[in-house]
Amino acid sequence: MTIAAVIRRKFLSPGWEAINRRLRRADIQPICLLILAIYSIMLILSFVTQEKGRTAFGPQLGADFQQFYVAGVIFNSQGPGRIYDRDLQRRLYHELFPDTAPDTELPYVHAPFFILPLPLLSKLSYPWAYFIWLLISLGLYISGFHLLWRSLGAMPESFYLMSLLLALSFMPFLVECLAGGQTSAFGFFCFALAISCERRGRQILSGAALALCSYKPTLLALTVPMLVITRRFSALTGFVIGALTLAAVSLLLVGWQGCAGYVNSLFFIGDHSTGAASGLRQWKYVDVNSFFRLLLGNHLYLRWFFVSVVCLLVLPLLVRFWLRASRESDSGQSLIWASVLIWTLVLNVYVGIYEATLIVLSVLLTVHVLYRKSKELQFELSPVHKLIMFLLYLTPWVTQPIARLTGVQLYTLVLAMFGGYQLICSFSPQNTKKYFADQSS
């Protein structure tokens, strides 16, 4: 018996078996419902007790939504060309939300076309504007989940409710996106729409949906290269058409001055995220750049050395997989998208934990593939897969305080582990099937 086998039997198997016994629908659904109930009560209390944006719990109501509200106010009162004026943003931010710390800054840095609904919302009082934003985010998230689920023919219908409850109670969505007022539900919906359109043979529409993700260009860091490498030329055509259309819309909305301000804001964020010094709260970011910045401090060259090493190790494997899987079946195509989504979060320079909502799509695609390859499991995932799912779900609840105390962003490591797991599944499908089936019963 090998050392690896001994370690697996003596140390890992008992943990896997314990998880396998506990992570069942009868246990999972009540826990998810309890989390959602607690969140709903806290959300109602936040609305009832808020005053000038601050709640009785301490944090601001909607938190990051305040930047979007301020951008809408600037659009209505000062003109669209000034929505990226940082001095004006800072002044109005503190006028509208006087309880914030004097040195706090929350600039609007999203693409100009994303401003479209914000002038309407900013005409309402802030609590009502945030409430509508919350409903929009919830609608986009559930719609995206449903779109992708319906396109995955191998997913058993009996798992739909449990999967949806897990997705809704997932901390990056529930706390960071909904409570935090972030935009990740929009990116989630766009990716879900793009993948769903591709699976239905609507390649151009898929590319056009991906173009909407340019509201935050870091989300396309791996997606566009993947389209080129896998020769998805119809999707690329749709992406280019969509991007040009959105550029025209942006120009009409904010003019040349606003578009120039957006480019300057990108340079501003780029300097802050990649330079030696940063005003960003690094413990809230999960990309490899932020991981090593938090771990190594301001050692710029050492950080970029390790970032380069990680990229040089992973990117060739991804490219090799994309080239091979581009000619494979539905399973190969699903794993391509699953790998793009997970590694976009890791191999990047500026990805907040709220963008980890994309993990839900990646998990659905991966489970879809495993189920197709291992029908003998009869809808039961292996303990090792459940262990990874458990870590993906649980770690976000504890990773930020741990990162602040230790300088180690655990969630980056968990994401990389899941991405590596996907590559193992793709490179050795028969061995993977046999290995995971071995622990299923």
Image (tube, rainbow, N blue to C red):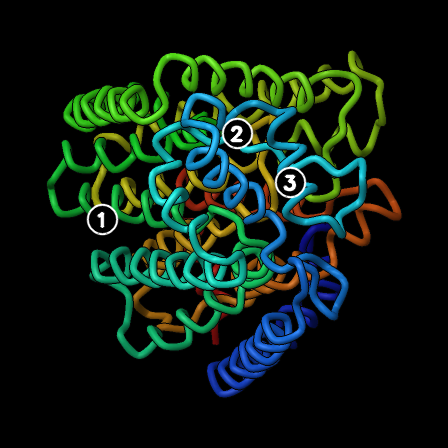
Disc 1 element:
helix
State the residue position of label 3. 93
Q: Quick one: label 1, few (<14), some, or many (20+) residues within 10 Å?
A: many
Judge whether 349 appears above or below 404 on screen: above
Q: Position of residue 53 (x, y in %)?
A: 65, 58
Question: What is the number of the mark on residue 109?
Answer: 2
Judge whether 143 appears above or below 238 on screen: below
Name the residue: 53% across, 56% down. Answer: 126
Task: Give the mark nearer the N terminus: 3 vs 1.
Answer: 3
Name the residue: 72% across, 33% down. Answer: 280
Q: Are marks 2 and 1 in contact (CB under 8 Å)?
A: no
Judge whether 248 appears above or below 169 on screen: above
222 and 59: which is toward the camera:
59
Whole-angstrom CA distance, mark 2 to mark 1, is 29 Å
Q: Position of residue 130 (x, y in %)?
A: 50, 58
State the residue position of label 1. 196
Q: Is residue 304 left or right of residue 357?
A: right
Q: Position of residue 79 (x, y in %)?
A: 42, 27
Q: Amino acid at mark 2?
A: Val
Q: Amino acid at mark 3?
A: Tyr
435 and 336: which is toward the camera:
336
Disc 3 element:
helix
Name the residue: 36% across, 43% down. Answer: 335
